[in-house]
Image: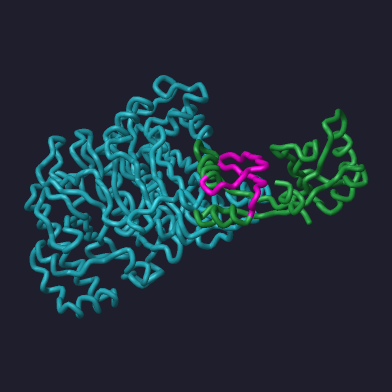
Amino acid sequence: MAIKQISIFVQNRPGHLADVTEILKENNIKIIGLSLTEGNDFGIVRLIVDDVYKTEYLLKEDKYLTRIDDVLVILIDDQIGLINSICQELAKNNININYIYMLLEEYNKKLPLVIKTSDQEKTKEVIENLGISVISQSTKSRNN
Amino acid sequence: MIWSLKETLPREDIEEIQLKRLKKQIKKIYKKVPYYREKFKEIGIKPKDIQSLADIKYLPFTSKEDLRLNYPFGMFAVPKEEIVRYHASSGTTGNPTVVGYTRKDMETWKECIARLVTMAGVTRRDIAHISFGYGLFTGAFGLHQGLEKVGAAVVPMSSGNTQRQIKMMKDFGATVLIGTPSYGLRLAETAIEMGIDPLTDLKLRVGCFGGEGSTEAMRDKLHESLGLFATENYGLSEVVGPGVSGECTELTGLHINEDHFLCEVINPETGEVLPAGEEGELVITPLTKEAIPVVRYRTKDITSIDYEPCSCGRTTARMAKVSGRTDDMLIISGVNVFPSQIEEVLYNIDGIGTNYLITVYKENYIDKIAIDVEVTDNSVLDSPDSIENLLKKVREQLHVTLGIHPKINLVESKKIKRTEGKAQRVVDLRNKDGN
């Protein structure tokens, strides 16, 4: 089972991201990871939250365009060269990385990293073969 | 200079010509256009009932819709072999409105334009650069033929490629500019960017602008930036194209070619004819048109008419600059667009919702249109590229179908403004005073 990430369409203007985070705060939803991709006049907000379906429900109620995707969260040690090994290995397997971002809190003393690639299944396999663990939403939620 | 003595006749003589021509025109229309014959019969009127100019109020109006319903040739009054030219309205989905010209119509058209450019100050010694697009749109060909009649040298540049336009104006020594006022301002800006100072490097002295309304502020700006005397002329393809009226150098309104066009101003709600000087919708009956002679054509343009003689020596009535529209048609840099047409294009694009907001504004005196559009297909959240592609598709569809280049803002649905629960579709920020 993979981690659920919610993506939200926002305009690239002051206050538009704040409108989204306000809804989350009002409903006591915890942001565990956040990334913002910038287009010319728009942005795509990607969030890992403690309750993705509630978040989706609330945002849809406010007519936001949202989408839920499976992403991988990998746990890495704070160590020079580790990210390089991952990137090299993915390149070798001809896997393209769409985006990567960090979660906001450590997990078992390791740094959690969200990764979305052109082939998620294979990515999981490649990373696990490097001896790096990949976590799922269920274990993550229990620990919160 | 005054091109024709017809422009200086006493009012009684003008009205005498008008009445004679109106009677003849209505008789002919009744005989040749079944559509009008039926309409006249429905309301129980015969050509002989028209005995004075005021009697025109008994005749039915004609709208753009009537022309569309009779697409393409239902309103024509002559056999097809008599037609020497066709034109059609711009920027429409569905059926356009088609108009035709006989050989005599072409002569009338040239005569009308010759008068208008002459009253703006154009002479046979001028070099006239035409930046209207040549095609079904009447603007370019209309001005072209009339300018040739006057004897000016015509440069049929057509639209687009602004830098090349400036090079040609400079190299050919153009003295007259023909186009939309907003394009005139764009030419000025582009010239400066190219390191060409229009005031010293170009020889422009007169501008004959049309295709869209303009303001006094725009006139000043055109004068300051291009060094020319800016005049405006008016017309619409349904009655001739450009050639109905134009400004003389006194700038006291647009002189109507009254021997060819009978103009009335009506209350757009009741259809009642308004007294001279009152503002309302302009209604035009061409008095000499052969190919497609419409009766009481409703222009939807708001103006008023002044029948006092002008200090320029002309006695023809003058209409005020058009101050607005009675319908929601938008004129964006000379292109006519109805919000409903934009809506139709948007509704046919997958991934876009049914809520939108059109904003029309001016940027450096040039008309701009922006459309807020909501995205409904969440698969585009995959990557910014998917969203860019959707944007591109919306832009392309609007350009291909309507000829406009809007700025598209993809927005969150809830950010599209609604008034009283009902969607507000158009916001026009263009200030009537010019900004």
Whether B198 is among the magenta residues is: no
Colouring style: by chain
Query: Residue sitting at 65 percent across and 41 percent down?
Result: A34
Say above or below: B181 vs B40.
above
The location of residue B104, given as percent across then percent down, is 31, 59
The location of residue B163, given as percent across then percent down, is 52, 32
Quadrant location, the N terminus of chain B: top left
Query: Residue sitting at 89 percent across and 36 percent down?
Result: A85
Does B137 sit left or right of B206 as displayed?
A: right
The location of residue B50, given as percent across then percent down, is 11, 69
Whether A32 is among the magenta residues is: yes
Query: Which color was chain A given?
Result: green
Does B26 sit left or right of B191 as displayed?
A: left
Does B153 sit left or right of B247 as displayed?
A: right
**B279 or B49: nearer the viewer:** B279
The location of residue B123, given as percent across then percent down, is 31, 35
Residue B153 seen in the current view: no
Quadrant location, the C terminus of chain B: top left
**B258 or A92: nearer the viewer:** A92
Say above or below: B182 vs B342.
above
Query: Residue sitting at 23 percent across and 58 percent down?
Result: B284
Q: Which chain is cyan?
A: B
The number of callouts visible is: 0
Does A21 sit left or right of A81 as displayed?
A: left
Span shown in magenta = A26-52
**B242 or B265: nearer the viewer:** B265
What residue occupies the far left of the structure in this picture?
B12
